[in-house]
Image: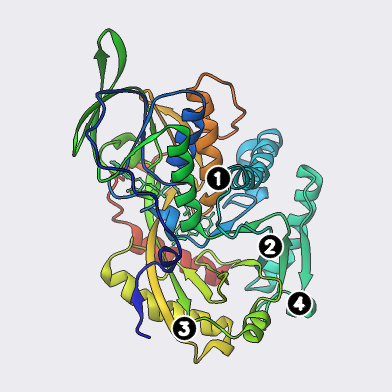
Amino acid sequence: MELFEHNYWLTTAEFPKPQARPLPSRMDVAVIGAGFTGLSAARTLAKRGAKVAVLESETIGWGASSRNGGMVLTGMKLGVNKLISMYGRELTRRMYAASLETIDCVERIIREETIDCDFSRCGHLEVACKQKHFDDYARQAEVISREFDHQLRVVQKNDLCAEIGSGIYYGGMVDEMSAGLNPARYVAGLGRAAIKAGAEIFEHTRVESLQHGSHQGDAGWKLITSRGELWARDVFVGTSGYTGEATPALRMKIIPIGSFIITTEILPEGLAHELSPRNRMIYDSKNYLYYYRLTPDRRILFGGRAAFFPETDQTIRRSAEILRRGMIDVYPQLADAKIDYVWGGTLDFAFDIMPHAGQVDGIYYALGYAGHGVAMATWQGQKMAELIAGEKPGNPFIGIPFPGAPLGMYNGNPWFLPFAGAWYKFLDWVS
Ligand SMILES: Cc1cc2nc3c(=O)[nH]c(=O)nc-3n(C[C@H](O)[C@H](O)[C@H](O)COP(=O)(O)OP(=O)(O)OC[C@H]3O[C@@H](n4cnc5c(N)ncnc54)[C@H](O)[C@@H]3O)c2cc1C
């Protein structure tokens, strides 16, 4: 079989196809973006009786939500000691508790909406690329147990073969609470659930700009789109790494970073079991990290930041070989395995590598998931919808400082990505 430059997950999923119809003139809430964030918000708002329009410039799940590794992870991108130093113990406790709640939130929605997406509480395994990284695992596990009453299991190098069929790591750390799923099936199911709840989804409808004003005596927003205008009382932005010119205040705070994935051919059962005996979601301890897992049909899915720039034909093609070499370093057993698919997607990094939610210039938003978005985006969509509906949901990410670039040296065009890539490689070398 030839190598397809195509997202493997899309070959396994069927997406709802909302009928193309004229935009309504007026809605209660306009949601921009039909990924986990936007669809989860639309579902929650529609269930509360709001008239909701989801405006998506491409199709349901077109963005990161169908392209990711399907790892439903506890915690955040930053380590707990860093979080405590930034926010103090109390706020970090609430953030960590929220990160655990995000997994339950995903599981609950999947159960309530009977979404067939291979959700499984298989746990995740972080593997240490250096002895120093491994030594830090015991400290992290101790802090997480003491401060957040959540148990992680440190795995010594000698015992690691029960978790992974690779000899290159210095040990690992397991979190049994994390889960795995098929992201394309999940986002398609969320789309179906939002429609069932009463939300209207408009595909191929790019929001070009937003103007605050009043319509028939009510304050609200005029959304100018590629398919006409729409008035809405409130606007919620869930555009993640694809945030663009329609929301300049957010665009200046989010760095779009490429992440790329290959999948192998279907592997024999014995080999698949040897590579990942407990079917964990696995990632390593580097900044420039690799993440990998078995797919439900027994391929190895292997991802990483093979290029820092977002996906283009060129970056995707180059990534296939870079990732294949990385995969064979981890798993020499796969030297002859054929690569069937390669694709890329764009991550959304805030300058402080934290998720952010709240309001800017009167517009609601949630983004900045930094590669930890499957669970957090679903949860943020739900929490922000509750807020828009007038409820008071606990959301510790609202109101934390949302920094822009130092000295304002960023207007949404990430000119510094090649330097950032080199910097992260340097950090991995010295850390
Ligand atoms: C390769 C890759 C691997 C990843 N792996 C994992 C993982 O294993 N685990 C994990 O937790 N996270 C992972 N992530 C991150 C996770 O996928 C994202 O955080 C999450 O999908 C974000 O969801 P979202 O709904 O906020 O954004 P998206 O799914 O990106 O959706 C945003 C949507 O907004 C639309 N849009 C943008 N601008 C406009 C506009 N002006 N008008 C209309 N529509 C617009 C876009 O077309 C897009 O469809 C990964 C990401 C990538 C790219």
Q: Which mark is residue 122?
A: 2
Name the secondary structure under disc 4: helix
10 Å crowding of disc 1: few (<14), some (14-19), many (20+): many
Foreground pick, 46 / 365: 46
Q: Which mark is residue 376?
A: 1
Q: CA distance from mark 4 to mark 3?
A: 24 Å
Q: Earlier in the sequence, mark 2 or mark 4?
A: 2
Residue at the (76%, 57%) spot, across then down: 152
Q: CA distance from mark 1 to mark 3?
A: 31 Å
Q: Are marks 4 and 1 in contact (CB under 8 Å)?
A: no
Q: Which mark is residue 325?
A: 3
Q: Earlier in the sequence, mark 1 or mark 3?
A: 3
Instruction: List x then y, in percent, for residue 321.
Output: 39, 81
Residue lying farthest to the bottom in this orientation: 336
Q: Earlier in the sequence, mark 1 or mark 2?
A: 2
Q: CA distance from mark 4 to mark 1?
A: 29 Å
Foreground pick, 181 / 356: 181
Residue at the (24%, 32%) spot, across then down: 23
- Which residue in the structure is indicated by mark 4? 162
Residue at the (39%, 73%) spot, across then down: 342
Left or right for 217, reference 338: left
Q: Earlier in the sequence, mark 4 or mark 3?
A: 4
